[in-house]
Amino acid sequence: MGPTRDNPSPADPGSSLPAPAAEIAKGYAFGGPALDLGALIWDGTAHPGAPVRIPLAVLNRHGLVAGATGTGKTKTLQLIAEQLSAQGVPVFLADVKGDVSGISAPGVPGEGVRTRAAEVGQEWAPAAFPAEFYALGGIGTGIPLRATVTDFGPVLLAKVLGLNRTQEQSLGLVFHYADGKGLELVDLKDLRAVVAFLVSDEGRPELKGIGGLSAQTAGVILRSLTAFEQEGAGPFFGEPEFDTRELLRTAPDGRGTVSVLELSAVQDKPRLFSTFLMWLLADLFHGLPEVGDLERPGLVFFFDEAHLLFGDASKAFLEAVTQTVRLIRSKGVGVFFVTQSPRDVPPDVLGQLGNRVQHALRAFTPDDAKALKATVKTFPVSPYDLEEVLTGLGTGEAVVTVLGERGAPTPVAATRLRAPASLMGPVDGEALAAAVRASGLHERYAQAVDRESAYEKLSSRTGAAAAPAPAAPGRETAPERPTAGREKPGPSLVEQVVGSGLFRSLARSVGTQIGREITRSLFGTTRRRRR
């Protein structure tokens, strides 16, 4: 890989590199703190004197790590996460294949590591990094990570249930009713109970003024919930709910904590875990303050298997993702989407990803060739023949372009990446389980809690009670856990449940008295005041 026939490489008297390569190398000579990705490749050779780097300050401008299976994407994530941690930046990693836990253990020296280090000018030494391990609902080895149904919200839940637009709107209406009546949706049985109540003779009048809930739509929602629960999704919803601010912690020595979410145990539920990752991101967005551009990000979030999030997504859902990605930058959070091809990411989202690490692509079929050409067009003009380079990259090599310190894209650089300092593989299962039990978060989140919520409240109703009693003047019928953003009782709905325009027309038609209202975000999520 090297210059094209139209771009010869005359020697530059002031450099050991050919002129085009020397010009590329200058684009990565940053003055401030930066992460070292590897060494520039030119004409098939890695040049350790020409490091390829990414400024720490631009990591909240988001990024993309892409490439075919087996090209080294996971090791790239591990390499970046290690250096972020060393710089005091917390990291979130989704571990889909179950081999990222090694970041908590020192790497093992070997001939391959020594060779790679020599090729890229790396002073390799084994190192372990502070890590916390999580598992969705406690399925797998990790601190259980749960969300309540009400905080997960109707938009994300509709996505994971595969509901259409009309059914999604109806689900939002159910959440709106539950919010207003103090029926907390903690787990899936709470949501089933409210849906069933609203189509019963007793509950049907409750929604008469705002369109009601048809028995047919309710049936679809209930069947979807039942199938979802039979797939084993029940443990993901409940309490104690995970506080996403735990992801922002640093270790006592000042290094950033690497939060590793094990997903290998739920690989057969891809829509669930991709949507759950979006909930984590949306909850962070909803709860963090505006901080603008920082010298270093407050968190870098790696969103693996990103294509699962965008597949079959509605226009409104994609708009919410796009807006969240665009705005969360100002809250100090950087997001890297990880997938096989840039085409997996919608153009409006892809356009916001200023940092690119593109591993090898394959061109075995006409569709592959088309995808390759489309990928090449997304890179800045380069002296490389990018079609040739992208199909010829070896494992642990990538084409890189990032945002420089002034915010302008750097030249495209074929790069041989450094070797991670931590263990490149999973840690021993017993050691991992011991680390989870020893965590200070284990006692807080390990044991599930099933307190009184919508299911219990509706089960205890008598036939004469048409709805939960409104709060008496000067007294609030609050649940045990305080909820942010409640409205005072009034003669009409002041603010719609969902922040998007999805239910605004519905809000205008409300004439009934609502006891309280929960303010919801773009995705219909709601953030609680947590201890």
Image (cartoon, rainbow, N blue to C red):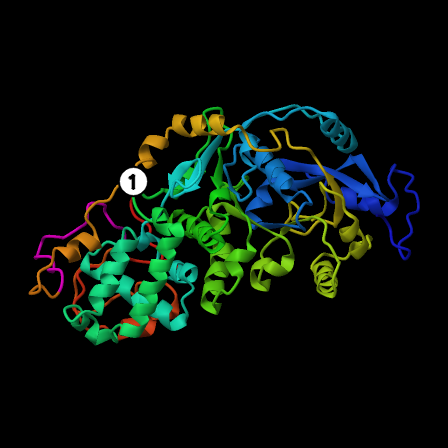
The image position of residue 276, as x and y in percent, is 43, 51
Q: Which amino acid lies under the numbered mark 1 shown in the image of this protein? A: Ala
The residue most toward the front is 230
**In the displayed structure, does residue 81 sit left or right of residue 442?**
right
Quick one: 464 or 140, which is closer to the camera?
140
Q: Residue at x 20, y 75 (%)?
A: 208
Tell me which corner region of the image, top left, top right, bottom left or bottom right, holds residue 4: bottom right
Point out the image quarter for the C terminus: top left
Please tell me whether residue 240 is drawn above or below residue 433 in the rendered image: below
Q: Secondary structure at mark 1?
A: loop
The image position of residue 291, as x and y in percent, is 45, 46
Residue 31 in view: no
Tell me which corner region of the image, top left, top right, bottom left or bottom right, holds residue 229: bottom left
**In the displayed structure, does residue 368 sit left or right of residue 3?**
left
The image position of residue 401, as x and y in percent, is 69, 49
Q: Residue at x 57, y 63 (%)?
A: 348
Residue 227 part of the magenta segment? no
Residue 502 in view: yes
Residue designated by label 1:
448
Please tell me whether residue 66 is drawn above or below residue 223 in the rendered image: above
Q: Residues within 10 Å of mark 1 (few under 14, many from 20)?
A: some
Q: Residue at x 55, y 48 (%)?
A: 304
Q: Residue at x 50, y 33 (%)?
A: 256
Q: Which residues are magenta?
A: 467-485
Quick one: 431 or 170, which is closer to the camera?
431
Number of labels in the image equals 1
The image position of residue 248, as x and y in percent, is 44, 38
Residue 481 part of the magenta segment? yes
Q: Main secondary structure of the magenta part?
A: loop
